[in-house]
Amino acid sequence: MGPSKAYEVLFFGRKLSAQDAKDCNLISEVFPEDSFQREVQTRAVKFAALPRKTLQAAKKLCRDGERDHLRDALKRESDVLAVLTTSDECRDAIKNFFIRKSKM
């Protein structure tokens, strides 16, 4: 997913359609609703037939490369959130949120 699409999702709460998710490589395939259960069942049977230890090793190899990047990103995000949540701007935003809620 490129930065502009990520900004739309994060800043404006835009929901991704299944096709958007596929186009961003977040998912590999989109199934029509009328064949969804059949497609999922077919793939589940194929996965169940794979050698378990080999599948686990392959998944681990794929995930290990990303794990450190994800931990680093989580640490950076946590540090930024710790600063932002103690700011006057955040306090005012929370206060305004509850004021708007109480008027509903």
Image (cartoon, rainbow, N blue to C red):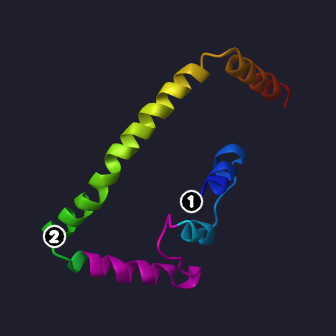
Q: Is residue 59 above or below residue 78?
A: below
Q: Is residue 54 above or below residue 64?
A: below
The N terminus: image quadrant: bottom right
Residue 27 image label: none
Identify the amino acid type marked 2: Thr
- Quarter of the image for residue 97 reads top right
Q: Which residues are magenta?
A: 25-47
Can residue 43 be found in the magenta stretch? yes
Q: Is residue 83 left or right of residue 68?
A: right
Residue at (54% x, 27% y) in the render: 80
The answer to which of 20 and 39 lies nearer the viewer is: 20
Q: Is residue 26 left or right of residue 87?
A: left
Residue at (44% x, 84% y) in the render: 38
Earlier residue among tags 1 and 2: 1
Residue 1 image label: 1
Do the numbered discs 1 and 2 sit on residues whose CB atoms are within 8 Å? no
Q: Position of residue 77 (x, y in %)?
A: 50, 33
Q: Position of residue 65 (x, y in %)?
A: 30, 53
Classified by dominant secondary structure, the portion drawn in magenta counts as: helix
Residue at (71% x, 23% y) in the render: 94
The answer to which of 11 and 92 lies nearer the viewer is: 11
Mark 1, secondary structure of its residue: loop
**Dot 1: within a 10 Å radius of its alpha carbon, few (fewer than 14), some, or many (20 or more) residues?**
few
Can residue 56 be found in the magenta stretch? no
Identify the amino acid type marked 1: Met
The C terminus: image quadrant: top right
Q: Is residue 6 left or right of residue 63?
A: right
Query: Which residue lies under the disc numbered 2?
Result: 54
